[in-house]
Amino acid sequence: MHPTTPTPIFLFSLPRSGSTLAQRVLAADNNIATTPEPWLLLPLVYSLKSEGMYTEYNHNVCAIALEGLCNELPNKKNDYQRHIHNFCTDIYKDLSKNNELYFLDKTPRYHLISQDIVDIFPDSKYIYLWRNPLSIAASIIETWGEGRWSIYRFKIDLFEGLERLIETYSNQDSGISVRYEDLMTNKENWREIFDYLDLKFNPRVLSEFTQTQLPSELGDLTGSKAYNEVSSEPLEKWKKTMANPLRKAWCKRYLLWIGKERLEVMGYDIDSLLKEISDIPFSFRYLISDMLWMPLGFLYCLTEPYVFIHKFRKILKWRHIHVHR
């Protein structure tokens, strides 16, 4: 065991927002320990939620049972959350092998439980990393869809995740808000993050981050391999991806759903983004493919074929096929 328990840093963002780059830059400082995408808090926090989990053991009943258990504790749910806090900080402590001051937990889908994390870790540090939402959508298509329409697989991030993250940021006084575009275009913006952490900013971290090793299958390996320095090169790539008329129409609807006020919280202007969409040169790239996959994406979300395929593979062992609740 280490003599000092590190203060957790939570890096909140949507996937494809540059969070892995930010993690590697911060980890280049000797005061910050980290590991790629722990996903540690998601099952712990969801243990008390009646929605969002389907399991063989019937999670709905489990949530009811745990709620009853919490009611038996002296301070109810607060005691349960305190034990989650202590459990996680012990793990962060064991992962901080050089007695670092901070442990950085970067798990993109923490956006779903961001308010819960703030409640459980009130004295921690919070970095909210925003990126042009159209750039995020385009990056999802290029990275995980290989250019083809794949937004339907990440709706929870682009819609519910974004909504919860903005709400969490808007409801609290602590934390620092930064834009990916600002970090890429002005290296001095990194200084604000280090100042927030009460650490001295050394510009060398912006080149030495390439030496930061994060041994895991999770995280953004694409950007890590493609860019060996902080660069503004990726900022305009989304326009080529979103150039056909179906994608441009989707982008406009998405921005209107986010709305002016929420975009302003993130640091973006809806009128400027809508104009950028209108100014994108017309393209037929992936148009026919999108006409097929956009409606199929709706059916994919409705029927969840992954669950069916998972069960179908067990059909010869029918005793292992169960109802998930």
Image (cartoon, helix red, strand yellow):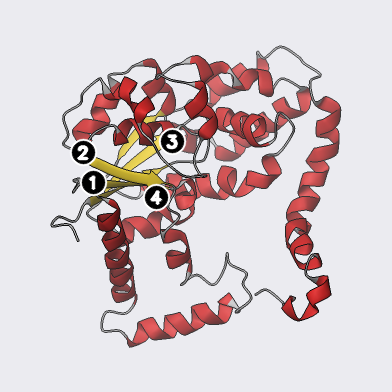
Name the spot of residue 176 as percent of width and height, x first: 30, 38
Q: Give how far apart the Cα atoms at labels 2 and 4 are.
A: 20 Å
Q: Which of marks 2 and 1 is nearer the N terminus?
A: 1
- Verify CB contact (< 8 Å) between mark 4 and mark 3: no
Name the spot of residue 199 as percent of width and height, x first: 17, 34
Q: Earlier in the sequence, mark 4 or mark 3?
A: 3
Q: Give how far apart the Cα atoms at labels 2 and 1 are.
A: 9 Å
Q: Give how far apart the Cα atoms at labels 4 and 3 are.
A: 21 Å
Q: Which of marks 3 and 1 is nearer the N terminus?
A: 3
- Mark 2 residue element: loop
Name the spot of residue 173 as percent of width and height, x first: 27, 46
Task: Quickly name the residue at label 4.
Answer: 168
Name the spot of residue 312 as percent of width and height, x first: 81, 66
Task: Quickly name the residue at label 1.
Answer: 102
Q: Which amino acid does label 4 sit on?
A: Thr
Q: Residue at x 82, y 26 (%)?
A: 287
